[in-house]
Amino acid sequence: MKFRSLLLMMCCALQISFAAQLGIYQRGTIVRMRMGECLPQRGFMAAISGNNMPMQTEFCPEYTLVTDKVVYVILGKISNQLLPLAETTNFRFQKNEIAVRVDDANQESKFRIKEMVLRSQWDREQRLMQQAEESPSGDLSSAMSVRPRH
Amino acid sequence: MPALSHRQPCLWVGFCLIYTFACLHLRAQTEEQPLLTYRHTTAEVRLTFLATENQTRRTASLQQSDFVVVDSDAVVRDFHTFTPAPEMKVELLILIDCSESVSPQVQRELREVLRLITETGGIEEGHLSIASFAGTQPKTLCQGNCRTWASERLSDVSAAGATPLYDAVVFATEILAQKRDQDVRPVLVIFSDGIDTISRHSVSEAMEAALKSEVQIYTVDIAGRKNHQRQGIDTLQTMSKVTGGAYFGVSDGAEILASVFADLRSAYVVTYSVPSRRAGFHEVRILPTRNHNLEFRSRRGYYYGTNR
C-alpha cells in the first residue's frame, strides 16, 4: 500500500516536472483576488452522495488571471486554497480546469474556470470602469458617453 | 572689410525686424489661447504593517517582492515607497473599564494599569492620557502629568454602572485625533471585559472612528474566569485585529508596552496609489508572494472619499 502511494506520488511529481521542462505552462499575472461563493461539487460521486449543494454559504478564493490574449476568472474548490501572488503565475489546462503551479512547493493547485474573456475586451471594460470612477457622477453611462468612437 | 561695414546696418535692421515679428506672433498666440492649468491629484495610501514568520518577528530581511497588497480586490505590486517605519513617538491613551460588570476584578485591573503606567518611561509625560468609562458616558481622568495622578488617585476609582465601551472608543479616538501628528503614532490600550451594555454607537461605528484616526488598539481582557463570555473576547479581538493592534489576557499586562514598542521598531511603511477611486471603505490585506509562512499585521482598511 505504501509502495503504491509512493509510486503514485512519484508519478505526479514527474508529470509536473516534465510539464515544466517541456514548457507546457502558460504565463499570466493575478491582478485581482477576492473571496467568492464556492461552486457546488459536480460529478457522479457528488450526485449520489447528495453533497452537491453546500449546506451553508462557503467562500472560496477567486482570482483574475491575466494573460496576453485571454483573461480568466478562476475559483478555488475549498476556502483555504490560496495562491502565492507572485508577479508571474504558471498554469496549464487540465480537462476543464486550470492547474496553477505553486513553485516553492513544486505542486499544482487546481481551479475551476468561472469566466473567460478576451484581453482586449477586458482592457476596454477596465478603462470604462476607471472612467466611471473618475467621472464626477461616478456613473458608468457618463463614462461611456465620453468614450472616443473608432 | 569696407564691404562688410556697408552690410552691417542692413544686418542690424533685419535682426530687429525678425525679433519684432517674433514678439508680436508670440503675443498674438498667448492672447488667442488661454493659459492651461493642469491639475493632477494623486491619492496615496500609506500603510504601516508588521511581518512575522512562524510567529517570530522579522525586522530586516523583508523585501518589496515578498508581498503584495490586496486593496479592495485589486492586487497592488507597484509601490511608491517601501521602507522600515521611521522612529516614531507614541501618543498613548489608557482606557479603563469601570463598569459594574468588572467590579470583582477592578482592583486587579487598576494594579495592571498602574504597572503599565510605571513602564511608560519611554513615553513623554505630555503624550500620556487616562480615561475611564462607566454609566452613560466616558470621561478623561488625566491628560499630562498622569504618572503622579495615577500613583495618588488611581486607587480611588470605583466600579459601578453600565458599560458604554463603543462610545468610549469613539471618545478616545477623538482625543487622540486632536493630538494627531505625522510623527506620532496614536495608541489606545483598553482594559475591559468587552461586553458593551449601553453605547449609542455601534461596534462598527467605533471601528470606523478608530480607522479614520489611524488609532492602533491594544486590548487587555480583564474578565474573570466565571464571567468570561465569548462575545466579549470576540469584541476585544476584533478591535485589535481591525486596527492592527493586539489582544492580551489580563496576566499578559506586562507585555503590552513591550509589544507596542517592538511593533514600532519592526514595522514597515508602504505607499501606493489608490487602485480604485470609489468612495467609502477600502478593505486592505497584505499577502505573501512566495513564502506562505509569512504573516502580516496591519489595519484592515481605510476610508477614501469626502471625509478621509
Image (spheres, grey):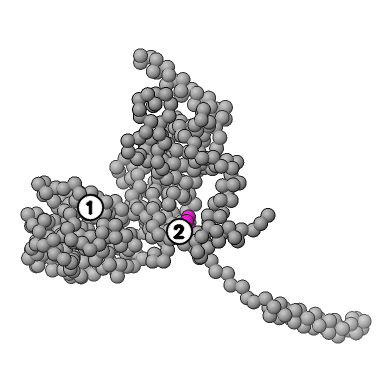
Q: Residue at point 30% right, 43% down?
A: B56
- Kindly state the secondary structure of the residue where label 2 is placed: loop
Q: Nearer the viewer, mark 2 or mark 1?
A: 2
Q: Is residue B5 visible?
A: yes
Q: Residue at point 10% right, 59% down?
A: B100
> Which disc is residue B236 wearing?
1
Chain assignment, label 2 = B
> Which disc is residue B278 wearing?
2
Q: How many discs appear?
A: 2
Q: CA distance from mark 2 to mark 1?
A: 30 Å
Density class for disc 2 (Cα within 10 Å; few <14, some 14-19, many ≥20) is some
> Which image quadrant: the C terminus of chain B?
bottom left
> Which image quadrant: the N terminus of chain B?
bottom right
- The residue range painted magenta reads B273-278
- Along the line of sight, which residue is nearer the eye, A70 or B108? A70
Q: Is residue B185 visible?
A: no
**Residue farthest toward the right in the current orientation of the protein:** B3
- Examine the structure image and report whether residue B93 is included in the region drawn in magenta: no
> Left or right: where does residue B240 sit relative to residue B65?
left
